[in-house]
Amino acid sequence: MSDNSITNVIRTVMVVFGTRPEAVKMCPLVLELQKHKEIDCQVCLTGQHREILRQVIEAFNIKEDYNLDIMKECQTLTTITTSVLEKMDPVLREAKPDIVLVHGDTTTSFAAALAAFYQQIPVGHVEAGLRTGNIYSPFPEEMNRLLTGRIATYHFAPTKRNEENLKRENVGGSIFVTGNTVIDAFKTTVKDDYLFSNLILQEMDYNKYRVIVVTAHRRENLGEPLENICRAVKNLTEKYDDIKVVYPVHPNPAVREMVYGILSNNTQVELLEPLDVLDMHNLIARSYMVMTDSGGLQEEAPAFGKPVLVMRTETERPEAVEAGTVKVVGVKKADIFKKADELLSDSEKYAQMAKSVNPYGDGCASEKICNILLKW
Ligand code: UD1
Ligand code: UDP
């Protein structure tokens, strides 16, 4: 808590997040901020996610100062936005932060930024400047990050390209290229001699099987695209008996119904509860490749030299596509199957993609952001 009379606190920095991917990328920054006694770091969870958010903050051993606890089953964009706005208001009045830091493109990020703006508290946007150029894809994330960027005074862009996007929009404020804090997270999560806490992953024979990590949850993929994804995966297991698909299923009921409907009772598919981030990162490190519609996995897997097939129609993360480790394959069953089939049958094609490139920084993004805040 901020009490300038006891310590030499000069800044109260409130870090707000509410979903799993934000947590993975904000926790390293919280750990860094906590190292400096000139900073009073306050953590406010919106609770847009519940169990899968808790998994991450526990892995990083972080305790929140506030939890708005807004999650409801089948929540809508409107209820998330209005609940965050309403519940942030008294928290901001009590904590009186000098700056509020939000992350990326979720509805938590946008609503928390707006809540801070309503109290004229400056906002710093971590992972700023990612764009597809299509406000309906990803939906609503592209609009969330545009609006958050407009509100923010400090933009922490992972790459030069993200900085250019912001400059092109004349977004105002100060832009800093820092790298992506997701790379920093590996310092906490990845270990060579890691023992999985999930028993299935612990007992998996990673030499006998080629392990394919699959995740899919995006709003625009619910329905037919997700069905195509599941059917393509099923077809792959019918063709290759040396693959094991590990699919930790997102808790969204709309996702679970479809995925379990098509892929349960398949001995080559492990449908798992959401993995804690330690298991997840170490699983990626031991996998053959990743098939996903997730944003975060597009940044993580390339750092381990694992090919990623992105089951979406476009990406806001073109850096790893240009480096050759990520391919955007769309959401049609035949296209997904074909590209995965190529990587499973053509060792040259696999080798071309399986090279370790990491366009997202040197693992010191949190330190850079923290130093900027200390100088400000
Ligand atoms: C949200 C973000 C998306 C991000 C994703 C990461 C928005 C609009 N979307 O989408 O950008 O990629 O998180 O996972 O901000 N649920 C639980 N327990 C949990 C979490 C979710 O039961 O711990 C269920 C609830 O029924 C909830 C539903 O999942 O209503 C959907 O959650 P929501 O945050 O609305 O959407 P996501 O698809 O998770
Ligand atoms: N993740 C995890 N457990 C899982 C699935 C994903 O820890 O079962 C991690 C993953 O490694 C990445 C983040 O969660 O760090 C991505 O979150 P998600 O896919 O929910 O969101 P997105 O990246 O699409 O916004």
Image (cartoon, rainbow, N blue to C red):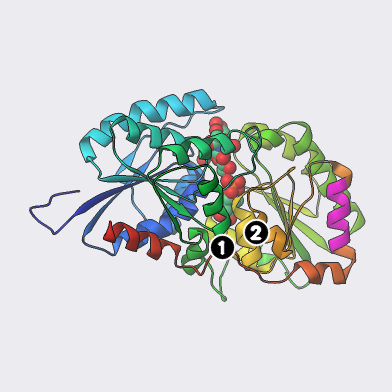
Q: Quadrant of residue 109?
A: top left
**Residue ranking furthest to the bottom:** 193
Label 1 sits on what residue type? Tyr
Query: Which residue is painted at 54% across and 25% down in the image?
Result: 76
Percent coordinates x, y for residue 179 in the rendering: 50, 62
Query: Which residue is painted at 35% across and 25% down in the image?
Result: 86
Which one is nearer the viewer's eye here, 129 or 66? 129
In the image, residue 280 sits, relative to residue 166, either above or below, namely: below
Q: Is residue 195 left or right of residue 306?
A: left
Circle on res. 319: 2
Q: Which residue is mark 1?
A: 360
Q: Is residue 159 left or right of residue 27?
A: right
Q: Is residue 229 left or right of residue 216?
A: right
Magenta-colored span: 335-343
Query: Which residue is painted at 56% across and 71% down in the image?
Result: 194
Q: Is mark 1 within 8 Å of ligand 2?
A: no
Q: Secondary structure at mark 1?
A: loop
Q: Secondary structure at mark 2?
A: helix
Q: Is residue 142 left or right of residue 349?
A: left
Dots 2, 1 in contact, CB < 8 A: yes
Percent coordinates x, y for residue 95 in the rendering: 23, 40
Percent coordinates x, y for residue 74 in the rendering: 57, 27
